[in-house]
């Protein structure tokens, strides 16, 4: 029996996750499904506002399967339209027989419309909805392709602007699978905010990432080439240290190619995002006697936070653009703040003594 691939919002640190909902703009959504992804046609492609992308299941769906969008809070829905089948004249993967269901609480569903020619749509006249579900009513003889959900609601539900799927591999540590699945879904949920913090013109982040938890890896975690590797031993002993995986997800997003970028700054930016965006207040004390701007990781993160707060609120974004384009140079700090990095370092360390 296939188990749903799901994310429980309760797992997300509610104080840390302040989406557009808190600003009265839009509501976040996640995908819950029993269907495994096929050919890297990820789940979030079904609700990314792009009719040329689509989710594709690895196997043929049956009556026990579903594909569900769950909203972080109920929204007043005016209309729903769902199109299945791949783009193009053949439109392979259409749902032949199935129903569109809705739920006010995310648990109990009622039928809203039947699929015809791979499509279902209905007017709801401002009905409060928490989840929308596609459910086959017979065994399909081909994989399912979900091209796009279109939802008119108040407040609006935010489409996946940075669609991503993090595939988990715990083949040598099956006891870590539940933990890794939750962390992967959390990193997916934060992916838009991480990308917004590090966006640059023309850059498209990865939309498929592999996260492997290994018993033979002796470090904590590392990332490269679209892959994240974590230590079974470390995360079994420190299951609450999900910030380490956010840090590695930031490295996937950075994707710096230039050798001119200093390692201390690359790691410092990743830890700045971790400690000042994802888990503020958890960076811990910085030793003023030992601290240096190029101390890397949380030390550099604290230095960057000081300079950002005092001199340039967009410092991280500007540094990121230069490192991504291969134009970083040490004089950039003076160009952005009027002071050399050494002068900023001395000023920052003096502030730590107060």
Image: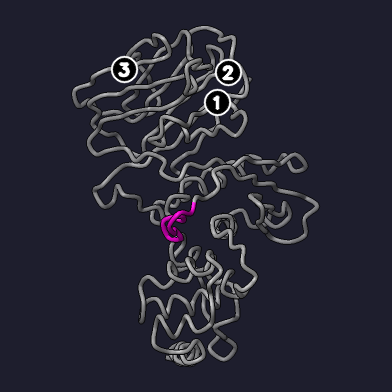
Q: Position of residue 4 (x, y in %)?
A: 55, 28
Give left or right: position of 221 versus 129: right
Give left or right: position of 277 versus 170: left
Q: Alpha-carbon neighbours of circle 2 within 10 Å: few (<14), some, or many (≥20)?
A: many
Confirm or deny contact between disc 2 and disc 1 (CB under 8 A). yes
Instruction: Give me the residue at 50% from left, 86% from top.
Output: 341
Q: Viewer-proximal residue, 248 or 6?
A: 248
96 relative to 332, above or below: above
Q: Viewer-proximal residue, 184 or 314?
A: 314
165 relative to 97, above or below: below
Residue located beneath label 1 in the image? 56
| Stretch in magenta | 194-203
Residue located beneath label 2 in the image? 143
Instruction: Give me the residue at 30% from left, 29% from top.
Output: 151
127 relative to 203, above or below: above
Q: Position of residue 102 (x, y in %)?
A: 34, 21
Q: Viewer-proximal residue, 276 or 202?
A: 202
Based on the picture, tell me whether residue 200 belongs to the magenta stretch.
Answer: yes
Residue located beneath label 3 in the image? 121
Of callouts 2 and 3, which one flags the residue occurring earlier in the amino acid sequence?
3
């Amino acid at each position: 029996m296939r188990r749903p691939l799901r994310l429980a919002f309760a797992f997300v640190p509610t104080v840390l996750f302040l989406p557009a909902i808190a600003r009265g703009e839009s509501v976040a959504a996640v995908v819950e499904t029993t269907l495994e992804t096929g050919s890297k046609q990820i789940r979030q492609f079904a609700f990314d506002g792009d009719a040329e992308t689509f989710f594709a299941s690895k196997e043929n769906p049956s009556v026990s399967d579903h594909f569900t969008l769950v909203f972080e809070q109920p929204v007043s829905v005016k209309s729903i339209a769902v199109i299945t089948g791949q783009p193009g004249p053949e439109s392979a993967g259409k749902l032949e027989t199935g129903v569109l269901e809705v739920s006010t609480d995310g648990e109990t569903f009622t039928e809203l419309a039947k699929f015809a020619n791979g499509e279902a749509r209905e007017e709801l006249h401002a009905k409060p909805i928490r989840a929308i579900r596609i459910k086959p009513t017979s065994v399909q003889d081909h994989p399912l392709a979900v091209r796009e959900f279109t939802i008119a609601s108040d407040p609006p539900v935010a489409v996946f602007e940075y669609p991503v799927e993090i595939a988990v591999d715990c083949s040598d540590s099956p006891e870590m699978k539940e933990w890794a699945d939750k962390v992967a879904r959390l990193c997916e949920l934060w992916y838009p905010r991480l990308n917004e913090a590090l966006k640059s013109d023309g850059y498209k982040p990865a939309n498929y990432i592999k996260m492997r938890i290994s018993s033979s890896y002796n470090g904590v975690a590392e990332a490269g080439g679209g892959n994240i590797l974590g230590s079974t031993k470390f995360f079994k002993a420190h299951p609450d240290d999900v910030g380490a995986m956010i840090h590695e997800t930031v490295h996937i997003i950075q994707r710096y190619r230039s050798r001119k970028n200093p390692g201390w700054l690359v790691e410092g930016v990743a830890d700045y995002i971790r400690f000042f965006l994802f888990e503020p207040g958890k960076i811990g004390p910085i030793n003023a006697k030992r601290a240096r701007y190029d101390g890397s990781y949380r030390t550099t993160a604290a230095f960057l936070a000081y300079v950002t707060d005092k001199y340039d609120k967009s410092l991280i974004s500007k540094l990121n653009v230069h490192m991504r384009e291969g134009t970083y140079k040490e004089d950039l700090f003076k160009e952005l703040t009027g002071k050399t990095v050494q002068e900023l370092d001395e000023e920052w360390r003096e502030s730590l003594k107060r």
